[in-house]
Amino acid sequence: MAKNVTDGVGGSAVLKPWPKRPARLAHAVVESLTDSIVSGVIAPGSTLPVEPELCETFGVSRITIREAVKSLEAKGLVVARQGYGTTVTPSEEWNLLDPVVLAATVQHDDDLVVLDHLVGVRSVLEAQMTAQAAEAATDDDLREVERMLGRLDEETATPARFIETDVAFHDRIMQSSRNRLGRSIIRTVHSQARTTYLYTGTPDSQACEQANAEHRQVVERLLARDPEGAARAMAAHIEAAWHRRRPAHPGSAV
């Protein structure tokens, strides 16, 4: 990916070319520029280099650069205005539900501010969907959730396998809620969060056992068709699991 250097707020960015030409050109340009914007290398208020310079830097055509800039605009990262160039917008304007923007944001979230917010959003939405599942789930849905709980019991000694099944377990409950929008939001934000060590940590067998004890409380409330109890159990589990994983000193994590 290109590493970008800005000559100051309000100035133009100076970009370095890739060591190797990527295959998906426009997408690769977007990812590179997104990373530079989100990391602060190209600061809000700065302007991107002019089109010919971008073409030369990335070794691509004007059509590719125009496609990339349009994509950046759609993500809320820049505003292109005739006569003013393409200006980076404030972070408040960025679309954090866009996978490329969210991935870059999570990767550069050294203080865990965004991850803390993400866990909060996940806790609220997933608790709501668990309450909905307590009412909407079919008997087949609940049998499948129970089956996955049993599988998790068997995998507590193998954390890598447990983590993958844990994701599927949560997703199966969300699916049972019939809340397609909520499930889509959680799947988007959670999949990006899981790409960073700061979010996943290194759970051991004891942490897996604790997580599954909390899972069992959720399932018990689902089987009892208790929406409020199921929601409380799910929110408590998500928040407790994050508390166990969250680095005490995130800046020192590797």
Image: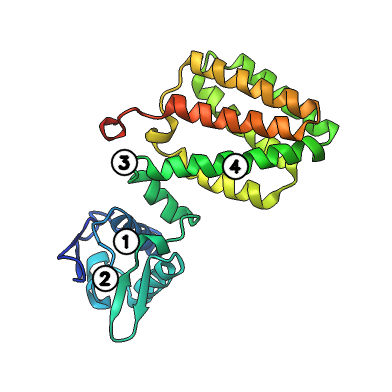
Q: Is 2 situated above or below 85?
A: above
Q: Residue furthest right?
A: 139
Q: Categorize mark 2 by other alpha carbons within 10 Å: few (<14), some (14-19), many (20+).
A: many
Q: Position of residue 96 (x, y in %)?
A: 46, 55
Task: Point out the tag, 2 or 4, that comes first from the N-terminus.
Answer: 2
Q: Quick check: 131 left or right of 42?
A: right
Residue beneath label 3, please?
110
Q: Residue at x 72, y 25 (%)?
A: 219
Q: Quadrant of residue 107?
A: top left
Q: Categorize mark 4 by other alpha carbons within 10 Å: few (<14), some (14-19), many (20+).
A: some
Task: Point out the tag, 1 or 2, that comes first from the N-terminus.
Answer: 1
Q: Quadrant of residue 77?
A: bottom left
State the separation of the CA atoms marked 1 and 2. Answer: 9 Å
Task: Point out the tag, 1 or 3, that comes first from the N-terminus.
Answer: 1
> For the residue marked with disc 2, what is the amino acid?
Leu
Residue beneath label 4, please?
124
- Asked whether the beta carbons under mark 1 and mark 2 sit within 8 Å of each other, the answer is yes
> For the residue marked with disc 3, what is the amino acid?
Asp
> For the residue marked with disc 1, what is the amino acid?
Leu
Q: Residue furthest bottom?
A: 83
- Asked whether the beta carbons under mark 2 and mark 3 sit within 8 Å of each other, the answer is no
- Asked whether the beta carbons under mark 2 and mark 4 sit within 8 Å of each other, the answer is no
Residue beneath label 2, please?
48
State the separation of the CA atoms marked 4 and 3. Answer: 24 Å
Pick the residue in front: 12 or 54: 12
Task: Point out the tag, 4 or 1, that comes first from the N-terminus.
Answer: 1
Q: Position of residue 8 (x, y in %)?
A: 16, 65
Pick the residue in front: 47 or 231: 231
Task: Point out the tag, 2 or 3, that comes first from the N-terminus.
Answer: 2
> For the residue marked with disc 4, what is the amino acid?
Val
Task: Point out the tag, 4 or 3, that comes first from the N-terminus.
Answer: 3
How many numbered tags mark residues here? 4
